[in-house]
Image (cartoon, rainbow, N blue to C red):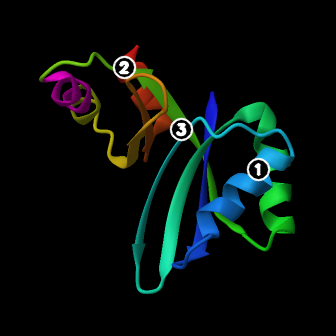
């Protein structure tokens, strides 16, 4: 399993470098991420292996970059072809699962998914 950490940063140069430096300094690999900016801040979602989450959180807090959300996510393989996303989303929809967060990983086509019902999502995608 994996964990998504949500970090809110100032929307200014160097903030992402600080995040990467803080996690890298304690040997934490960021396996995927997405981010957006608005209203003077940046919201960054980072995918961290479960065994590294506590180190990542401690390093980010030490660098005055608090983690505002920490949640379990699914990381699923997705075929790199037209219609794959639609098929996966339909499976979750048919199971009554709402997708709350979605982004891709580094180095391959995998989707990171947070939902309102992780158990049903796992069952739907099994």
> Is the C-beta separation of discs 1 and 2 under 8 Å?
no
Name the quarter where the C terminus is drawn: top left
Dot 1 or dot 3, earlier in sequence = 1
- On the image, the x and y values in percent for residue 58 come to 85, 57
Question: Which stretch appears magenta?
Answer: 83-90
- On the image, the x and y values in percent for residue 22 come to 78, 56
Q: Dominant secondary structure of the magenta stretch?
A: helix
Depicted 82 relative to depicted 51: above or below: above
Dot 1 or dot 2, earlier in sequence = 1
Magenta run includes residue 89? yes
Q: Which residue is mark 2?
A: 125
Gap in angstroms between the C-alphas marked 1 and 3: 19 Å
Characterize the local packing of mark 1: few (<14), some (14-19) or many (20 or more) Cα atoms within 10 angstroms. many
Q: Which-is-in-front pick, marks 1 and 2?
A: 1
* Secondary structure of the residue carrying numbered label 1: helix
Q: Residue at x 20, y 22 (%)?
A: 84
Dot 2 or dot 3, earlier in sequence = 3
Gap in angstroms between the C-alphas marked 2 and 3: 13 Å
Depicted 75 relative to depicted 60: above or below: above
Say which of 125 and 112 sits in front.
112
Characterize the local packing of mark 3: few (<14), some (14-19) or many (20 or more) Cα atoms within 10 angstroms. many
Q: Which residue is mark 3?
A: 73
Pick out the residue farthest to the left: 82
Q: Which residue is mark 1?
A: 23
* Secondary structure of the residue carrying numbered label 2: helix
Q: Which-is-in-front pick, marks 2 and 3?
A: 3
Depicted 61 relative to depicted 28: above or below: below
């Amino acid at each position: 399993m994996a964990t998504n950490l949500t970090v809110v940063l100032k929307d200014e140069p160097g903030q992402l470098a600080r995040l990467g430096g803080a996690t890298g300094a304690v040997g934490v690999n960021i396996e995927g991420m997405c981010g957006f900016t608005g209203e003077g801040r940046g919201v960054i979602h980072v995918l961290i292996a479960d065994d590294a989450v506590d180190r990542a959180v401690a390093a980010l807090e030490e660098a005055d970059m608090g983690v505002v959300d920490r949640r379990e996510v699914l990381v699923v393989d997705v075929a790199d072809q037209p219609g794959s996303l639609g098929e996966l989303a339909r499976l979750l929809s048919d199971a009554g699962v709402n997708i709350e967060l979605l982004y891709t990983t580094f180095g391959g086509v995998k989707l990171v998914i947070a939902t309102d019902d992780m158990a049903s999502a796992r069952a739907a995608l099994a």
